[in-house]
Image (cartoon, rainbow, N blue to C red):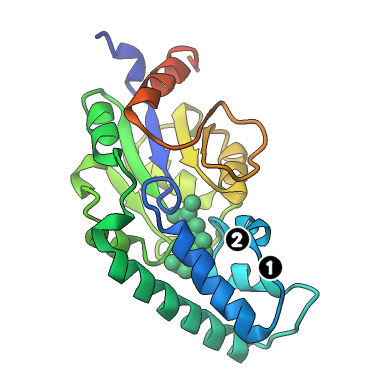
Amino acid sequence: MNTFYLENKAVIFDLDGVLLDSAEYHYLAWKKIASELNIHFNRKINHLLRGVSRKESLLIMTHGKIELDEKQITEITTRKNALYLDFVRKAGEKLLFDGINDFLAELRKTPLKLAVSSGSRNAPELIDISGLKKDFFHAVVSGQDFTRSKPDPESFLMAAGKVGINAENCLVIEDAPAGIEAARRARMGTFGVGNAELGSCDIKAESLSLKNVSFIFEYFKNHEV
Ligand code: B16
Ligand code: MG
């Protein structure tokens, strides 16, 4: 296969909800917090929290319902994270979505640069416990590395910088409305996965599997900058 058109191109993967099945555990932890705070919470509200930082997630779900001071915000987000870590540590290797290592191995046969860019401060631990192979990636950016969370483009621009590829030559794979918005603001291509309402994306699929590797090749073939 001639892959010259994949040179100087990069694919940037979101982690939670794209490579790892950890989004459900964020939902379960926030659901418990909401019931302790006695506020309404459901999956529709949860979609708005995908990709967004811990503190901003709490502010979104409590908006117009209860007022919290900084001390309460710190206490609640610390408790939410403890609940979340308890879930994901128990899940371990079950976190990795089926077929992800095969999908990444296929892309690794090409000149494409691969990066992870996650809003999660827990991303390094999640990668370790899930068995996701770090060697597949030329760079990993986590919530510990940047200050402005999605929909700000900072995390994706940082990943592009680390792999040395111009933003216009990057394709972002995301499950979150905030992440797709961040990719658009960074002028990167968008590959939306899952079933959240993401608006129009260059590529869309229910999940990542070998059968949509060809969508990525097609995207870059038709995307000469
Ligand atoms: P943490 P991603 C995001 O990860 C999650 O989607 C989002 O639900 C979470 O609030 C955010 O990380 C911060 O995570 O509390 O672990 O630091 O989708 O950007 O990989
Ligand atoms: Mg995500």
Which residue is outermost to the right? Answer: 64
Q: Label 1 CB, ligand 1: below 8 Å?
A: no
Q: Residues within 10 Å of mark 1 (few under 14, many from 20)?
A: some
The percent coordinates of residue 18 (x first, y second) are 43, 45
Going by the image, does 190 lie left or right of 215? Answer: right
Q: How much space separates mark 2 and mark 1, taking CA atoms?
A: 7 Å
Count of picture labels: 2
Q: Label 2 CB, ligand 1: below 8 Å?
A: yes
Three-letter residue code for mark 1: Ile
Q: Residues within 10 Å of mark 2 (few under 14, many from 20)?
A: many
The percent coordinates of residue 33 (x first, y second) are 57, 79
74 or 126: nearer the viewer: 126
Going by the image, does 206 lie left or right of 201? Answer: left
The percent coordinates of residue 171 (x first, y second) are 46, 32
Q: Residue at x 53, y 70 (%)?
A: 54
The quarter in which the N terminus is drawn is top left
Three-letter residue code for mark 2: Leu
Q: Which mark is residue 60?
A: 1
Q: Residue at x 71, y 78 (%)?
A: 39
160 or 80: nearer the viewer: 80
Q: Residue at x 36, y 24 (%)?
A: 211
The percent coordinates of residue 223 (x first, y second) are 49, 16
Can residue 119 be seen here? Answer: no
Q: Is residue 127 above or below residue 180?
A: below
Q: Residue at x 29, y 70 (%)?
A: 90
Q: Is residue 52 above or below residue 19?
A: below
* Residue at mark 2: 49
Considering the numbered disc 1 on the image, is that residue within a helix, a strand or a loop?
helix
Which residue is outermost to the top? Answer: 2
To which quarter of the image does residue 93 belong?
bottom left
8 or 121: nearer the viewer: 121
